[in-house]
Image (cartoon, grey):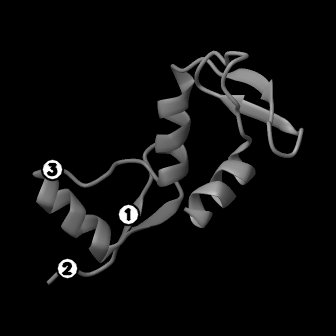
Amino acid sequence: MYEDKTLVCRTCGKEFVFTAGEQEFYAEKGFENEPKDCKDCRKKKKEEGKQFYTAVCANCGGEAKVPFKPHDDRPVYCSECFAKMKEEN
């Protein structure tokens, strides 16, 4: 029913693919307009308003940037360790 479409990002001017799966998702959610920006630009805009905090990953000891203020009583994980833990569960 849906076919992949190539669109142009209004922010960076690069072409990006609006996949058939994404179009189906948009239709299911009732979204009427196609995306105007590529995924990278949408992600950047979303993160612009957020404050990020730096913490030490409880698993590997590396740097973890998180959108919440870390507390000493709860472990914080870097994105790589968090993704690995999620896959294991």
Query: Would you say 73 lies left or right of 4 here?
Result: right
Query: Would you say 48 lies left or right of 3 here?
Result: right
In the image shown, does 85 or 67 lie closer to the viewer? 85
Judging from the image, what secondary structure is the residue with disc 1 in?
strand
State the residue at coordinates (66%, 25%): 74
Residue 30 at what x, y percent from top left? Answer: 10, 51
Q: Which residue is labeled 1 in the image?
A: 7
| Location of residue 55 (image quadrant) | top right
Which of the image's four quarters has the C terminus? Answer: bottom right
| Front of the two marks 3 and 1 | 3
Judging from the image, what secondary structure is the residue with disc 2 in?
loop
Q: Which residue is labeled 3 in the image?
A: 31
| Front of the two marks 1 and 2 | 2
Query: Would you say 2 lies left or right of 70 here?
Result: left
Q: Which residue is labeled 2 in the image?
A: 2
State the residue at coordinates (29%, 73%): 21
| Location of residue 78 (image quadrant) | top right
- C-beta proximity under 8 Å, tags 1 and 2: no
